[in-house]
């Protein structure tokens, strides 16, 4: 949709657009900032980074500001239709070339909590039961790896920043017709952080901004992939809770605090708190899993039951269950922490036997396979249960030795994902954060000073038509899924009409025809096709946000099996990896 979609022969004027939005979306739209009452950081006269015109008023709120940012809106219409949507300009940034604690901002309207948001460098919709906050990223700046940006007299040392229009939507019962509403934004972070939020009144925002892209975000519209909807999640995170003690684990925050972040500011669709098995009391396993039921919101936010089998001698695996059953099996025979000797460790076949005995369908997913501290033994790979491998997390990429971001721990060449595929193993690819900082879906690697701007988060993307726990699991099991480094990249990969994760018989006639479609969260730098572990074709995109390619493998040999997968790299370094397709 654009400025000519409504009338066709002429652009839609703001006074015509507002009743259209009210009629079609049930939202009475008004300018969201009139006067700022208080702020935790001085405002100033700077050129608005994404508008043609501006009144030069902007307010920056660092995540760890001493005070909240509070402002009055314009007067609410006397007879608002449906919900009320406050529109203004917004921006998010990192404030440093180094990774920073992510935290969150809580937004209140007339003293009532409306939404919790966090720094993003992509368009995002945050929803609660009653409210929503939509941000449409129209300008995204990103520095080279370990570099920084100089964007203005204030933004002088940025790893990345994003700017665009935003809309805060609340029920009309929250506001009083004929009067201004008060909006307050308060930052929360466990440590010191340079991340910031910016707001500006943006006069004439309905005329001078592509407001239609913001409306698409409000509607929750997303591209389809191979005839399916795409949902993003983080299914590998750790709390700091140990048994019933609120702290002492390798992660941060209690279990409920991690669920709260995942269901709120993280902005993801599905989640799993996969604590190490030693963090869970063996007599209270069902209580640990019950949180997944408590936070479950089918169609909006779903939770898998799972845990991490943390074997130092055989390699780490996460176990995920399809339904409301399942149990936990410890890598230590004494239910101790991460046994480093064979005598005290349970075996991987014992893990699979215990999971099969519980009767609930499950997946066993290896991750950071090449880590020198706990390398993964590919000889113990089980194709029945290990349908996936985690190719990316906050520890870096496990695709191949030398990939960027490389991670901070030492790695063994020969144990990477690409080499396992070359051995003939067949598995799909996902990513998740392996987060330990209490910020699922948005985790940043610690220590922050060593991480640079890469190495955070990691999302799994599933192709399914309904957001339920069972559908998410089934898409993962079918390998109808892919990995991203933590941004919503929409990636379609098919061979001769078959979707990623498929196994095809050898072709008796013709050659494989690969079709790739990608909608980036930022401009796309290139799309690379990998065949049998080698780069077979590179498609340069030159910063386009949408790209399509068709490539025929003229060197296909039907006498030997082959596998293909796709790697997408954006101009900001963020990536996506498709699950492979096998032929023969």
Image (cartoon, rainbow, N blue to C red):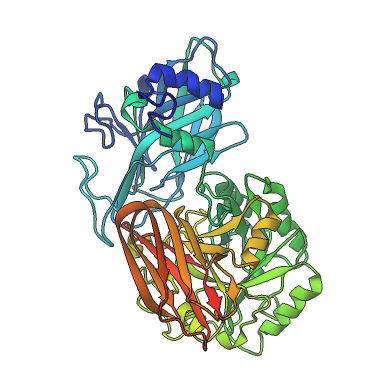
Q: Residue furthest front?
A: 509
* Residue pictured at 60% horizontal, 67% vertical: 479
Q: Position of residue 372 (x, y in %)?
A: 46, 82
Question: Which quadrant holds the C terminus?
Answer: bottom right
Q: Where is residue 13 in the image (x, y as percent from the top left)?
A: 37, 20
* Residue pictured at 40% horizontal, 68% vertical: 551
353, 20: nearer the viewer: 20
* Residue pictured at 45% horizontal, 81% vertical: 556
Q: Position of residue 198 (x, y in %)?
A: 34, 36
528, 550: nearer the viewer: 550
* Residue pictured at 53% horizontal, 12% vertical: 177
514, 567: nearer the viewer: 514
Question: Which quadrant holds the N terminus?
Answer: top left
Image-based side of 286 in relation to 221, left or right: right
Rendered position, 291 above or below 14 = below
Visible residue check, residue 393 = no
């Amino acid at each position: 949709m654009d400025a000519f979609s409504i009338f066709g022969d002429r652009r839609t004027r703001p006074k015509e657009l507002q009743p259209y939005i009210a009629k079609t979306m049930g939202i009475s739209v008004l300018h969201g900032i009139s006067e700022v009452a208080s702020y935790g950081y001085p405002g100033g006269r700077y050129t608005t980074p994404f508008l043609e015109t501006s009144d030069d008023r902007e307010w920056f709120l660092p995540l760890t500001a001493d005070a909240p940012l509070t402002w009055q809106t314009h007067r609410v219409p006397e007879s608002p239709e449906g919900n009320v949507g406050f529109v203004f300009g917004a921006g998010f940034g990192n404030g440093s070339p180094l990774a920073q604690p992510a935290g969150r901002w809580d937004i209140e309207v007339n003293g009532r909590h409306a939404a919790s948001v966090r720094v993003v460098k992509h368009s995002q919709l945050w929803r609660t039961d009653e409210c929503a906050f939509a941000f449409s990223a129209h300008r995204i700046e990103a520095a080279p790896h370990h570099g920084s940006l100089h964007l203005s007299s204030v933004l002088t040392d940025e790893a990345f920043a994003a700017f665009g229009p935003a809309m805060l939507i609340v029920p009309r019962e929250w506001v009083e017709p004929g009067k201004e509403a008060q909006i307050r934004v308060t930052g929360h972070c466990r440590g010191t952080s340079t991340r910031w939020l910016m707001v500006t009144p943006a006069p004439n925002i309905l005329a001078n901004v592509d407001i239609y892209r913001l409306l698409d975000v409000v509607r929750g519209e997303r591209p389809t992939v191979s005839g399916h909807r795409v949902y993003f999640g983080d299914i590998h995170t750790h709390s700091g809770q140990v048994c019933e003690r609120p702290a002492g684990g390798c992660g941060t925050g209690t279990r409920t605090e991690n669920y709260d972040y995942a269901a709120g500011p993280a902005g993801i669709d599905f989640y799993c708190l996969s604590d190490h098995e030693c963090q869970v009391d063996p007599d209270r396993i069902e209580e640990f899993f019950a949180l997944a039921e408590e936070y479950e919101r089918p169609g909006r936010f779903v939770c898998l039951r799972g845990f991490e089998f943390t074997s130092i001698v055989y390699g780490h695996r996460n176990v995920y269950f399809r339904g409301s059953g399942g149990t936990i099996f410890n890598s230590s025979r004494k239910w101790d922490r991460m046994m480093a000797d064979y005598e005290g460790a349970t075996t991987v076949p014992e893990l699979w036997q215990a999971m099969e005995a519980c009767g609930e369908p499950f997946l066993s997913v290896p991750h950071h396979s090449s880590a020198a501290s706990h390398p993964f033994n590919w000889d113990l790979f089980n194709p029945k249960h290990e349908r996936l491998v985690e190719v990316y997390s906050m520890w870096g990429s496990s695709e191949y030795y030398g990939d960027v971001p490389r991670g901070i721990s030492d790695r063994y060449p020969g144990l990477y994902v690409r080499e396992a595929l070359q051995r003939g193993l067949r598995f799909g690819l996902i990513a998740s954060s392996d987060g330990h900082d209490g910020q699922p879906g948005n985790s940043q690697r610690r220590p922050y000073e060593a991480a640079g701007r890469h190495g955070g988060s990691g999302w799994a993307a599933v192709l399914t038509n309904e957001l339920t726990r069972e559908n998410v699991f089934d898409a993962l099991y079918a390998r109808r899924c892919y990995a991203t480094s933590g941004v919503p990249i929409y990636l379609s990969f098919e061979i001769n009409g078959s979707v990623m994760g498929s196994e095809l018989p050898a072709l008796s006639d013709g050659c494989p025809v690969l079709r790739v479609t990608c909608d980036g969260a930022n401009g796309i730098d290139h799309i690379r096709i990998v065949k049998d572990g080698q780069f077979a074709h590179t498609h340069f995109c030159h910063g386009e946000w949408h790209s399509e390619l068709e490539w025929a493998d003229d060197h296909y040999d039907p006498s030997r099996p082959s596998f293909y997968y796709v790697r997408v790299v954006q101009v900001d370094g963020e990536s996506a990896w498709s699950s492979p397709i096998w032929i023969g």
